[in-house]
Amino acid sequence: MSKKKDVVVQNNNNVLYIVIILLLVVIAVLAFFAGRSMGNPVAVNPANNAAVATDLKITVIDDTRCTSCGTNDIVSQLKQTPFLAAAEYEMKDFADEWIEDYIKENNITKLPAVLFSTNQIADNGAMAQYLTAIPSGEYSLQIGASFDPFAQRSERGFLMIEDKAVIEEIRSTAHVEGDADAKILWLEYSDVNCHFCQKMVDDGTVETVTEALPWVFNHAFVNFIGVGWNRTQEAAEALECIASTWSTEAYNYAFKQSLSEKRDSVRDILAYAEEKWVDTAATQTCIDNGDSKDLVAKKYSTGQQLFGITGTPGNVILNIETGEYEIVSGAYPADTFETTINSLSL
């Protein structure tokens, strides 16, 4: 009796296995035809059995005037992505015929732009969340592009500030470290809660660039209300009060120590300032009276409205003689800043 029962169970299992196999075959067939109906047939990469799009066009619009866009690196990374390996890639430049009109019509304001012919990518929908539909019917990949091709630029392709009074105001209110007579001013819009700002300090990025390019530039931390909001605002006001009641040296020291040690309270910042013999009673009075609020607000506004800074660290490399400048958004390695500073100083 038990043997008969075992045979029945085994037979039932066999039937179940057959049903499962048939269901898998049906699902595979449906997926195949669904893929065809969506205009996005897929193949299998024999190297890793990953599904890859075989009817996908990726258009990359760059601007040769951008020295820090990293477009080639972006394209290289896309091509190394298994499910994009079979895509057709097309490179375009802002100066090419009809491209300016095209990006205006599609509300593309920053380059480089990476455009997909479809959002039906064979990656289980992982990339679709980063694709935004545009009027042309294509999909724009969100990559944090920051180069404005429509901005006023010099003959050398750099962004420009033509008003010398604006440049002088920026320079005179910056708490500069380095050669006061250097023609390149590196404004680092930063805040004491910013992780990537902390990384730049920990990596010694400014110091490395200074060793490579002595006397070429000077550097200034500029308070920008980015991460942490209320705590960042309080820290910014405290730091500006340290500068106004004591010295630029104390301001920069307290700023760097706060970033390096990841301690952002006003009490901590004043403790760092005391190491530079700051009269913290006078600084506290400045803070309590709100004496630095307007200056913090003005610098924040300048970062946003003049330079388009939206987050920290936002680095502005400015030639104070010519008014030319470039934006380096983020915590890049020292050689990125060296290249930008060198090109602006020529």
Image: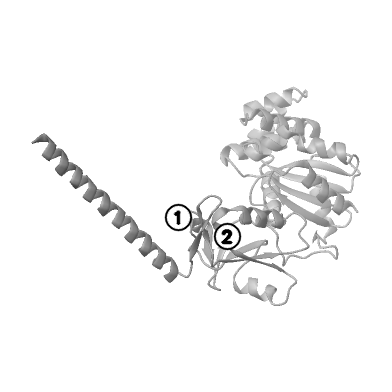
Residue 272 in the image: state x and y as whole percent.
71, 25
In this rendering, does residue 320 appear at all? no
Image vertical order of residue 252 relative to residue 327, above or below = above
Query: In the image, residue 19 lies at what x, y percent?
Result: 25, 54
Q: Is residue 279 above or below residue 170?
A: above
Place residue 145 in its image quadrant.
bottom right
**Residue 104 visible in the snapshot:** yes
Q: Which mark is residue 124?
A: 1
Q: Secondary structure at mark 2?
A: strand
Give the camera-side residue of 74 and 189.
74
Q: Does residue 297 appear to the left or right of 44 in the view shown? A: right
Residue at 72 percent of width and 44 percent of height: 332
Question: Toward the viewer: 260 or 45?
Answer: 45
Crowding near the residue tagged with mark 1, few <14, some 14–19, many ≥20 C-alpha atoms within 10 Å = few
Question: Which image quadrant for residue 235?
Answer: top right
| Residue 251 position in % (x across, y down) | 75, 33
Q: Is residue 123 left or right of residue 283?
A: left
Q: Is residue 193 above or below residue 136?
A: above
Mark 1–mark 2 contact, CB under 8 Å? no
Instruction: Look at the image and tell me in which quarter the C terminus lies.
Output: bottom right
| C-alpha span from label 1 to label 2 | 17 Å
Q: Residues within 10 Å of mark 2 (few under 14, many from 20)?
A: many
Callout 2 amino acid: Leu
Left or right, 51 with respect to 12, comes to right
Instruction: Say which quadrant the N terminus sits in.
Output: top left
Residue placed under numbered mark 2 in the picture: 141
Q: Secondary structure at mark 1?
A: loop
